[in-house]
Image: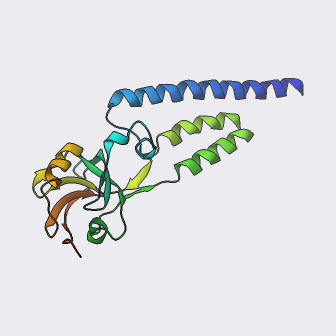
Amino acid sequence: MAPCRNLRIWAWLVAFVVLSMLSTRIACANDSEDPHLGSLGDYLAAGKFDERILKDSLLGLTLCEDRRKLKSDAFARGLLVVAVKQGGPAANAGLAALRTTPKEVISGIVAAGSMAFPPAILLLLVTNLLPNGVGGDLIIVADGSRVRNLLDYQNYMRDVRPGEIVYLTIVRRGVRKQVPVPIPAIGN
């Protein structure tokens, strides 16, 4: 009976050490791929990525730099719509914000399952690869001006006045689409 118990303790320790080493290696590998990309959790958490979030009060959007795959297998860089203010011009035009996935729930189930079967803890590596969010429109063009980053967007939006219509080209589910966003006149 004692050797079986010792074996189970050793299995826990080995699973913990392997998971620790691999998750650190994955985190370092992800950091080295592109230092300008971060997870949605990083963007939304207060702290180090705040300078890469833009809150556009004119359209009622919260944006961050991102890239998305098109149906043609090419990638488009632009600004991901993280949040849309209810009743704002962007919401009225139908722009969609990023929705979170149940990644934390799946991670919790795997962690609980590893109590009964310790090697199952290795499945946390797979859950780490799940996306932090789904959907969300990616703005790639504003009235014919290419938008690749926050600076491009701010330079264009500086000239927009109330009462005008801004035509945004977005990527939604891999397909480009043009969306007119009327800016309400002052007093409306």
Observer-nearest residue: 105 or 148? Answer: 148
Q: Horizontal and vertical percent for residue 76?
A: 22, 46
How was this image coloured? Answer: rainbow
Q: Horizontal placement of 66 versus 123: left or right?
A: left
Q: Residue at x 9, y 55 (%)?
A: 144
Q: Horizontal and vertical percent for residue 57?
A: 29, 59
Residue 86 falls in which quadrant of the image? bottom left
Residue 164 falls in which quadrant of the image? bottom left
- When the figure is inspected, residue 166 is found, relative to residue 38, above or below; the finding is below
User: Looking at the rendering, in which quadrant would you find the C terminus?
Assistant: bottom left
Residue projecting furthest to the bottom: 188
Observer-nearest residue: 68 or 78? Answer: 78
Residue projecting furthest to the front: 187
Q: Horizontal placement of 175 versus 155: left or right?
A: right
- When the figure is inspected, residue 3 is found, relative to residue 132, above or below; the finding is above
Q: Horizontal and vertical percent for residue 38?
A: 38, 38
Q: Residue at x 23, y 54 (%)?
A: 139
**In this orientation, does residue 149 appear?**
no
User: Looking at the rendering, in which quadrant would you find the N terminus?
Assistant: top right
Q: Horizontal and vertical percent for residue 106?
A: 58, 49
**In this orientation, does residue 34 appear?**
yes
- When the figure is inspected, residue 72 is found, relative to residue 187, above or below; the finding is above
Q: Horizontal placement of 59 versus 27: left or right?
A: left
Residue projecting furthest to the left: 144
